[in-house]
Image (cartoon, rainbow, N blue to C red):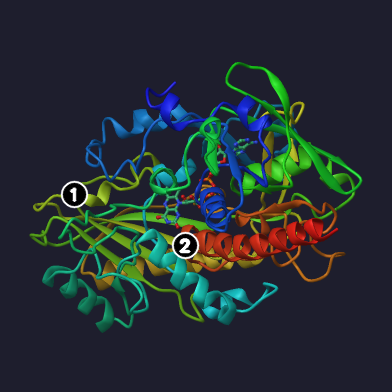
Amino acid sequence: MHPLAPILLSDARAIAGAAIDCLVIGSGTSGVTTAIELADRGLKVAIIEAGPLILTEHVGSGPFANREDIVPQIHDLVRYGTVWTSEKELAAAKARTAKTNNNAWSLVGGRTVFWGGCTPRFRDEDFADWPYDAAEMHGWYAKAERLIGVSGGETDNTAPPFMTHAAQDHLLGRLAKQGIPATHAPLCVDTRAVHGGRMSLGFDSSVSRLLRCRHFGRVENGARLSLASETEALRLVVDGGLVRAVKVRDRTGETFDLSARHVVLAGGCMQSTRLAMASGLGDSDPHVGRYMGDHLFRQAVFELAEPLKEKSLYIFIPPTAKRPFHAQLQGMFQETWYSPLHATCWLDGDVGGRYVLFYCFGISKAEEAGRMVLCGDGKSMKDYCIVNDRSPGDSKTLADMARFTADVGEALGGRVVRTEENAAGSALHEFGGLRMGRDPSLSVTDPDGRFWRVGNLSCADAAIWPHQGSANSYLTITAVALRNASRLAAGLEAEGRAVAAQ
Ligand SMILES: Cc1cc2nc3c(=O)[nH]c(=O)nc-3n(C[C@H](O)[C@H](O)[C@H](O)COP(=O)(O)OP(=O)(O)OC[C@H]3O[C@@H](n4cnc5c(N)ncnc54)[C@H](O)[C@@H]3O)c2cc1C
């Protein structure tokens, strides 16, 4: 247990004894954004998180930022393997004989403690399959960017870019000359000046956002917003179209029920979907666990002709109507290769380095066959696999991404030292499983993430997305969570007034 636990964390048993308006399952950006928004509106909110508290801020905001020897070991405290498979290999995955080939994390703050910080918006056309359009999202994007401290974004709303210098401009110029317009990257690193008592917030992480929230404290002390760690939601007990209780197991291993007026799934796309399936919600709704996917992901390393004589650069090549993928370039390094276990390796590069890391994320359209299958007894967080076969559209985009990788290397006057197409699921930008829509016969939730068939249940994370743009998901998850929490708060307030008037 973290030494600060007696000050910060609540006992899940104490949450069981309190009158909770909303129980949020998961403490990543979707859960914490939702919880703070609801608490700000006067509602009593409790978060349960399956993992432990290990850090109180993003791993790159503190002393470990450049410790590539230590950071992977911190990951290993809270990381577990998952399986993405094909239709052909599914039997092995179900029998639990398939090797894990992807990662998942479970800790207070979720993946926000380790994420890489790149925060582009979706393009307007990326919302074509959503039940609302881009115009609806613009205001929520702006609010989310302010909340998490995005710098170098597309609008004046964001702070000055983190990475700009003449050597980077030189590379941007080379790309532009070859018809590849690029820019500095939008990053979730707070670049507002440190002055007059104001400290930089560093990278956004939901754990530090939660700890800064004035409503946050122990439920035992009457706090409006509380969190119990190492408390896993095992099953939703649904009866008569309502969640009557959430069966949980706390850090002592005991299982008992928590109840609340409303329950929000925010376990990350995979775990929210798994919990819904493990609770039998798929029995009455064939869309539960379907239309799941992740970005297509190619990575490379380029060797430039000479060092830039600058330690760090971060370039973003946006997608276009014809190019359903974007690219991120990070430098400068001695020869190396990207690993998700040190996603902020670009923070402090090597002034003599000649190597640039390249990541290309492409859109994979949601297919019904892209789905979750429960494995083993389906009861633990590890008891699932994702079936994901490349569609003809994916194969075409992947071929275009491979060509584009070579084009960018050439435009920079560099050499592609190594490039690989990564396996499905490795982009860590998963979506779908509980897709939202306007038609209850074609979707699991309404446009606000509220389940059509369970009145007091909603989902805050990317499980509800019917589709995604090429943009990395953190900013959009946060913006959608803000939108939906605001609408949920209004709904709960109205219900409260109606009950009081009776
Ligand atoms: C190494 C890395 C680099 C990344 N880089 C970027 C980037 O540059 N840009 C970007 O946009 N995105 C990036 N991402 C992805 C981004 O971090 C995630 O999309 C986002 O943080 C997901 O937030 P979430 O709230 O949906 O879920 P998560 O962060 O996964 O949080 C969910 C939490 O819920 C808990 N939980 C789940 N089920 C239960 C249960 N049954 N009971 C209790 N608790 C439960 C889990 O333990 C977990 O802590 C990166 C991710 C990683 C890991």
Which amino acid lies under the numbered mark 1 shown in the image of this protein? Asp
Side of 216 relative to 238 (left or right) = left
Asked whether disc 2 touches disc 1, contact meaning CB atoms under 8 Å apart, the reply is no
| Quarter where residue 440 is shown | bottom right
Residue 85 visible somewhere in the drawing:
no
**Residue matched to label 2:** 475
What residue sits 25% from the left and 68% below the top?
161
What residue sits 73% from the left and 38% below the top?
90
**Residue matched to label 1:** 348
Q: Nearer the viewer, residue 221 or 213?
A: 221
Q: Nearer the viewer, residue 220 or 407?
A: 220
Structural distance between the alpha carbons of marks 2 and 1 = 24 Å
Q: CB of residue at label 2: within 8 Å of ligand 1?
A: yes
Vertical comparison of 42 with 393: above or below: above
| Quarter where residue 271 is shown | top right
Measured from the top left, where is residue 295 in percent x and y? 54, 58
Side of 451 relative to 419 (left or right) = right
Measured from the top left, where is residue 23 in percent x and y? 65, 43
Q: Nearer the viewer, residue 107 or 184?
A: 107
Which amino acid lies under the numbered mark 2 shown in the image of this protein? Leu
- Label 1 CA crowd tier, 10 Å (few <14, some 14–19, many 20+): some
